[in-house]
Amino acid sequence: MGLVGAYGSVGRQVAQLLAGKVALRLGGRDPRQAEQLNQQLGARAEVRALDLWEPQSLADFCAGCSLVINCAGPSYRILDRVARAALAAGADYLDVGGDDPLHERLVGQLPAGHRVLLSAGMLPGLSGLFPQLLAQSFQRVDALRCYAGGLGRLSATAAEDFLLSLGNGFGQAQCGWCEGQVVRSTASAEQALQRDWLPPAGVQAYPYLSTEQQRLFGDVPVRHGQGFNLFEGGQLAAALQRIQGSAPEARSSAQNIAALVQASALDVAGRRPYQLLAVEIDGLREGRQQQASAWLRASDGSRLTGSVAAFCALQWAHLPEGLHYAAQVLDATACLEQLLRWLPDTRVRLPDFAAVALAEPEEGVL
């Protein structure tokens, strides 16, 4: 298996989980950093210098691989570059990002018998899987609300990817789901959202409907669906609002990338980083109308993303052939159970999930 972006924060987690289980090839622009990672893994991998913007370098890296795993970014700038090189070399392809723009480019392009899996990270990925675990206990889902957010310093690559995704098919602000259609959201972000799984002061919740959520709401199915991006601290949300008011072609400028990185650092300064996924469902369960909620809280989004990708890689032979989004083909229960074994500091509250002890948040801390 070839790992692109091997020594980044996500790739490093994938490498640590796969080393010793599969034959691993580590790729990155700086072979010294890749070799340093290899030594930390007990020299159990092969190291190759890789410049993914150089076609021959990319082709040489993919040659001989059965699966190429892309953990490099920005995903919205790389698009189908690595995927096409992998397929040309006869390999399958796994991407922690990619999302809808890559899916559109690959429809009808896969050779027979191959697998391509996209959006195989925390968000999107686990964010589309986790709600299914609660939804499956309902006979009918009338309303489903998905929440995602947290505190953590963004890398420059993550900030650029986020800005490139704005208006690029990732989702729509101030939109919701009703009877199979995207509609204007009636939810307001003016008041702080307060729940027992949030800090006492609450957080700002901004209505946002991602394409992953649209697929989820259609698959479950649900009558009414809504997604929310959660922000605690205020600096990152304010920076995003300023940037979204600028011209689309200027949004991913170096100045705006730096502003997002700085804002995220200010929000998390002196506080414990976390990432949160939560879901609320209204519907028919056990023959009566009920409401239920579930949440998952992790300390590091990069480790969570890398763990989802590693799970996909180890389950590869059991996944369906063709082009798919991870959240639509993975076994949600098996995935969550494995993530909790790999990341024991992750906390989950999910009714009827026997593998997880109920966890209470510390007061004022996520």
Image (spheres, helix red, strand yellow):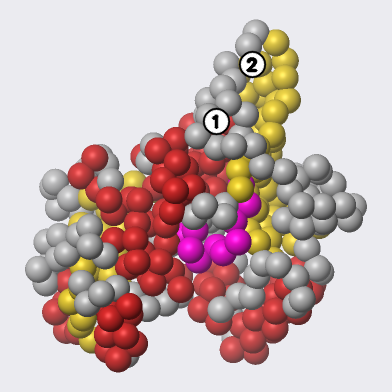
Q: Nearer the viewer, residue 314 or 365?
A: 365
- In this view, the residue farthest toward the top is 287
State the extent of the magenta-drawn residues as a range. Answer: 296-305
Secondary structure under tag 1 reads loop
Which of pointers 1 and 2 lies earlier in the amino acid sequence?
2
Residue 338 locus on image (x, y percent): 41, 46
If the image is split into quadrants, where does the N terminus sit? bottom left
Report whether residue 231 is seen: yes
x and y percentages locating residue 171 in the rendered image: 58, 55
Residue positioned 67% across, 48% down in the render? 147
Q: Residue at image x 53%, y 56%?
A: 123
What's under tag 1, amino acid-wise? Phe
User: Viewed as shown, does residue 103 lie left or right of 213?
Assistant: left
Closest to the camera, between mark 1 and mark 2, is 1
Residue 285's disc is 2
Q: Indicate whether 331 appears above or below 56.
A: above
Q: Position of residue 328 (x, y in %)?
A: 41, 40
Q: How many angstroms separate mark 1 from mark 2 (CA)?
A: 16 Å
Q: In which quarter of the image is residue 89?
A: bottom left
- Between 16 and 194, which is closer to the camera in this rendering? 16
Classify 204 as above or below 59.
above
Q: How many marks?
A: 2
Q: Position of residue 153 (x, y in %)?
A: 64, 75
Residue shown at 66%/42% (left/top)?
Answer: 359
Q: What residue type is labelled 2?
A: Arg
Using the image, tell me which numbered label, if any, was put on residue 353. Answer: 1
Q: Does the magenta stretch include residue 185?
A: no
Q: Residues within 10 Å of mark 1 (few under 14, many from 20)?
A: some
Q: Which residue: 80% across, 68% down?
A: 233
